[in-house]
Image (cartoon, grey):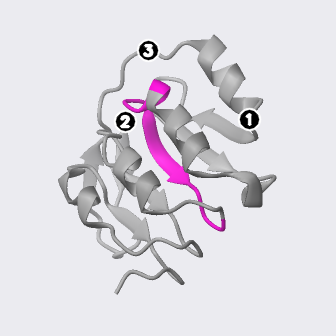
Amino acid sequence: TYVSDLESGNNVTEQLPEAPPVDEKILENLRNKGLIISRFNEKSDLLDVRVINNKKQWTDEKTALLTQIKENIGLLDLSETQISNASINTISSFSNLIHLQIQKNGISNITPLANLKFLRLLNIYQTKVG
């Protein structure tokens, strides 16, 4: 399975990182916290994780719950939530993260994300990073 670099317009493709099997009970528990979670495709254990509802109730404490599936998160959308730099420290351990949307938050430091070797897209629009 491959991911394409659509943002740059290049025809570069890369193989998706391998992720371990994920426990469906953990996923169900996280979905009950207000997350939309889906697999990239039927052959991958990489997950697309998004906060859709109750964004203003999503905090650093809830982001910490995602460490249960940290090796499985390929896409994470925490845009317009109440996260801070503490969540960035947590997210920096999500080793297979490819796409991160954290726009419209109070974040001011993304330096911990520098070690995420698969990260290809980072949206920090309307944050305090600068």
Secondary structure of the residue carrying numbered label 3: loop
Q: Which residue is under mark 3?
A: 21
Most distant residue in the bottom direction: 130
Q: Which residue is under mark 2?
A: 1
- Between 20 and 129, the residue placed more toward the observer is 129
Quarter of the image with the N terminus in it: top left
Instruction: Work out how far the residue at label 2 is from the one at label 3, CA to CA, in angstroms.
Output: 16 Å
* Badge 3 or badge 1: first in the primary sequence: 3
* Residue 94 appears left or right of 47: left
Quarter of the image with the C terminus in it: bottom left
What residue type is disc 3 on? Answer: Pro
Residue at the image point whose x is 47% and y is 23% from the top? 43
Secondary structure of the residue carrying numbered label 1: loop
What segment is highlighted magenta in the picture? 68-80
Is 45 inside the magenta-drawn segment?
no
Is 76 inside the magenta-drawn segment?
yes
Residue 33: mark: 1
Residue at the image point whose x is 35% and y is 25% from the top? 19
